[in-house]
Amino acid sequence: MFEFKLKFKTFNGLIALYIRECKLWLGLKYVIASSLLIPLLYFFLLGTGMGEMIQTSFIGNIDYILFLTPGIIAMGTTSIAMSSGHILFNERRFWGMYEEMLTLPVSRSAYLLSKILWVMTLSMGQLLFILLVGIPLVEGGFYCANLFLVLLSILLGAICFCSLIMPIASLIKSAAAFYGITGFISLPIILCSSAFYPLDTTPHWLRMIAYINPMTYMVDVMRAGFTGLWDQWILLKILILCVFTVFFFAIGVISLKKVRF
């Protein structure tokens, strides 16, 4: 009975923290607007601009717009996770809100989960924008072969990248160092993956980096969901993405527990 009450209290605490996170972000309407619109701009400008230049034979005989869409959504998820890390850093270093959160009867892992839930929420908003606005305008209709794989990749990617930024946001004390590190790692994560181009046509050294990049597996799983085309390695890619997700989530929880004031 006591264990059930404890779990119920933890769940209620998680919901309360998630609602708090939503209210915090809703006060930053310009950030939400840019998070939803920038992927759409990438979709139209990069997709239509480069679509005519790239031969479909290089990308599995599919339209470049459909090839690019998972990369844009994955990039958006990463950007939202980075922004969530920026808010955690400000809460911890400048606003004093993280110390107040520690007085609540909830675990620090619940705090991390509340941020992950928000990243997932905004990522779903990006997905809806592209599915209901972007693809119909360019392709002439709704197109998504396997929605389950798309949602699964967003779920795992949100957990993975939000957890990845937490150790940096929770342990680094210098604002200059924090923004410098996050700016330095975000670009390679996006570019050293299969987000914008097939890895088969890239140099060997770039492929090796991409194979240890969780975004590669997030994009590949999502691309399989969008196009309905996947190879015999799709289950292995899902498993590898799950391993990355569990690893970074554990690191994120441990880093939050080590925060001292």
Image (cartoon, rainbow, N blue to C red):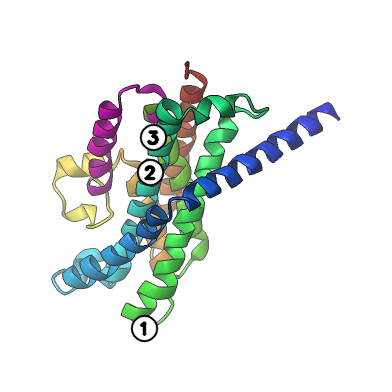
Q: Are marks 1 and 3 in contact (CB under 8 Å)?
A: no
Residue at label 1? 140
Q: Are marks 2 and 1 in contact (CB under 8 Å)?
A: no
Residue at label 2? 83
Where residue 248 sits, quadrant-wise, is top left
Q: Which mark's residue is nearer the viewer, 2 or 1?
A: 2
Q: Residue at x 38, y 56 (%)?
A: 30
Q: Which mark is residue 165?
A: 3
Q: Spatial distance from mark 1 to mark 3, Cα to Cα? A: 38 Å
Q: Residue at x 44, y 34 (%)?
A: 88
First in sequence: mark 2 vs mark 3 = 2
Residue 67 visible to an observer of this rendering: no
Q: Over which residues does the magenta segment extend?
A: 169-191
Q: Main secondary structure of the magenta part?
A: helix
Local SS, label 1:
loop
79 on left or right of 120: left
Local SS, label 3:
helix
Q: Residues within 10 Å of mark 1 (few under 14, many from 20)?
A: few
Q: Residue at x 37, y 61 (%)?
A: 223
Q: Residues within 10 Å of mark 2 (few under 14, many from 20)?
A: some
Q: Which mark's residue is nearer the viewer, 2 or 3?
A: 2
The quarter in which the N terminus is drawn is top right
What is the three-letter code of the residue carrying label 2?
Ser
x then y, percent, for residue 259? 47, 19
100 on left or right of 9: left
In magenta segment, residue 171: yes
Farthest bottom residue in view: 140
Q: Which mark is residue 207?
A: none
What is the three-letter code of the residue carrying label 1?
Gly
In magenta segment, residue 18: no
What is the three-letter code of the residue carrying label 3?
Ile
